Image (spheres, helix red, strand yellow):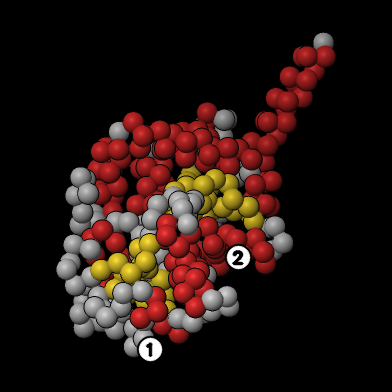
Amino acid sequence: MMVVAIYVASTLAITSAIAAETTEFRIARQPGIVYLQPVLMEENKLVEKHAAALGLNDLKVRWSIITSGGVMTEALISGSIDMAVTGLSNMLLLWDKTKGGVKTVAGVAGTSFLLLTRNPNVKSVKDFGPDDRIAVPTIRASMQAMLLGMALEQAYGSGQHGKLDVNQVQIGHPDALQALLNPRHEINSHFSIPPYQDIALRTSAVHAVANSIDILGGTATITNAWTSQKFVDANPVKVKAFIAALDEANEMIAKNPKMAAEIYLNVTKEKISVES
């Protein structure tokens, strides 16, 4: 009887949790192949699939693309989105400001980011001058801005992380790529991500100045999915469905990377081959 009672209580708790959740889930991501899993999750409706398996039927997942992690942070604070998939720094900054009010749900990707320039005189971060303009997704707050600050402290010493703050221009990666490849554009440098850095390096006028792996001293998780603790507490089924969908997307990439790349390129229309 005790086992039956526990089972009934558990079933009632799960049913109650499902009934309390809304049937809408708003998720935002940034552009780039480091967000490949969310692309696969959206195209294959994986969150909806796993939500239904958990008993939350007819879930409407609304995906959006926001090029700036800072803007996405504001969207989450205002309640315009439920979950953000961004660089890790955006979550950490808000975690500090809210004293733990936001939490990482899952790590998403870890890959190298390259600081690129078309200024032939720039060989290291020490060579940037007052006329150089460096594109980053969010000034001072994005992973790229943070990595630039770390590189500057390594070059100049502690406390020098803001030495190139005035050189930073806030712009999304797709537009930053176009600016970098335009010799007349004031933006002549870009702390980039794949595939935009790979596309840029096809041009002989562009070269790499720094690599995130060298700056960090090794590989690291760069992007993550995160939300407020309040949302997690109120929507346990959605969060479980998201994690299960992310796991399935990772399995899809591992089993058939070519198919995953084809889906990504079909969605984004980016000018790069599957083999790249």
Residue 130 bears which disc, if any?
1
Give neighbour class at mark 1: few <14, some 14-19, many 20+ (Cα, 10 Å): few
Q: Is residue 213 left or right of residue 117?
A: right
Q: Is residue 126 left or right of residue 60?
A: left
Q: Nearer the viewer, mark 2 or mark 1?
A: 1
As drawn, 133 above or below 15: below
Q: Identify the amino acid type marked 2.
A: Leu
As drawn, 258 above or below 108: above
As drawn, 145 above or below 17: below
Place of residue 145 in the rendered image (x, y in percent of width and height, measured from the top left): 47, 70
Place of residue 11 in the rendered image (x, y in percent of width and height, measured from the top left): 70, 25
Quadrant location of residue 30? bottom left
* Label 2: which secondary element: helix
Residue 170 bears which disc, if any?
none
Place of residue 140 in the rendered image (x, y in percent of width and height, measured from the top left): 51, 74
Q: Nearer the viewer, residue 94 or 275?
A: 275
Q: Nearer the viewer, residue 253 or 72?
A: 253
Q: Nearer the viewer, residue 76 or 253?
A: 253
Could you tell me if residue 158 is visible in this image? Answer: yes
Mark positioned earlier in the residue sequence (2 or 1): 2
Q: Quadrant of the N terminus?
A: top right
Place of residue 266 in the rendered image (x, y in percent of width and height, measured from the top left): 24, 48
Residue 93 bears which disc, if any?
2
- Measuring 20% from the left and 45% from the top, which residue is drawn there? 275
Q: CA distance from mark 2 to mark 1?
A: 28 Å
Could you tell me if residue 79 is visible in this image? Answer: no
Q: Identify the amino acid type marked 1.
A: Pro
* Label 1: which secondary element: loop
